[in-house]
């Protein structure tokens, strides 16, 4: 898999950098988006299911994920790995001073990719996309 990137010039925030110092950084290029209908059609082409069947399964998957996560369970999906809910809080010196209404942070859902998905990132090669001759590298603040 080739990971395409371009260079953009941005402010240098490193320690000791001058006020106008800038560095070039890699910025990933998006090679497009696969929408839900296309994904379902692709899955249907590789299975005995129709696109509507695949959409129905995804609909139920999201519903089941919500139910199990709200009940404090971790959801394992072969090939993807796991989804779990986590929460943090501010601290208090004494247990009796802890007030959940004001000290709890907003819960988040954590996705942990499977080892198979992680290896996808290890097989990447990089391809720098040069700007057109009339263009200078992009500058972003």
Image (spheres, grey):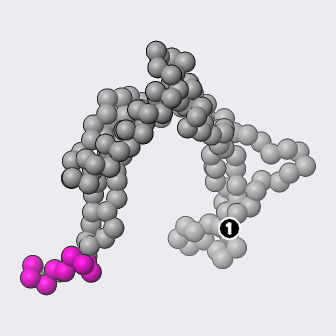
Q: Is residue 40 above or below residue 95?
A: above
- Looking at the rendering, the stretch of residues picked out in magenta corresponds to 95-103
Q: Which residue, given by chain and number where applicable, does mark 1 sit on?
A: 141
Note whether 132 is above or below 140 in the view shown.
above
Q: Residue at x 21, y 53 (%)?
A: 72
Label 1 environment density (alpha carbons within 10 Å; few <14, some 14–19, many ≥20) = few
User: Is the magenta region chiefly helix, strand or loop?
Assistant: helix
Q: Position of residue 44 (x, y in %)?
A: 52, 22
Closer to us: 35 or 15: 35
Give SS at disc 1. Answer: loop
Query: Quick one: quadrant of the N terminus?
Result: top right
Q: With respect to residue 8, does 43 lie above or below?
A: above
Residue visible at 70% across and 55% down in the picture? 8
Which residue is at 34% across, 59% downward?
Answer: 108
Where residue 78 sits, quadrant-wise, is: top left
Observer able to see residue 113: no
Instruction: Please provide percent x and percent y for residue 35.
Output: 59, 39
Residue 96 visible: yes
Residue at the location (68% across, 67% down)?
Answer: 141
Q: Is residue 92 inside the magenta stretch?
A: no
For this orientation, the residue located farthest to the right is 134
- Please state if 75 lies on the left or on the right of 58 as rendered: left
Verify whether residue 96 appears in magenta. yes
Q: Position of residue 14 (x, y in %)?
A: 55, 67
Question: Between residues 124 and 105, which one lies in front from this camera angle?
Answer: 105
């Amino acid at each position: 898999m080739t990971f395409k990137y371009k260079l953009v010039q941005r402010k240098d925030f490193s320690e000791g950098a001058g006020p106008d110092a800038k560095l070039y950084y890699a910025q990933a290029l998006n090679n497009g988006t696969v929408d839900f209908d296309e994904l379902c059609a692709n899955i249907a082409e590789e299975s005995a299911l129709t696109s509507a069947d695949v959409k129905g399964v995804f609909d139920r998957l999201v519903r089941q994920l919500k139910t199990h996560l709200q009940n404090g369970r971790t959801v394992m999906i072969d090939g993807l790995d796991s989804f779990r809910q986590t929460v943090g809080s501010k601290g208090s010196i004494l247990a009796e001073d802890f007030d959940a209404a004001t000290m709890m942070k907003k819960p988040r859902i954590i996705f942990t990719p499977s080892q198979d998905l992680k290896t996808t990132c290890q097989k990447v090669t990089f391809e720098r996309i040069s700007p057109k001759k009339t263009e200078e590298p992009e500058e972003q603040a």
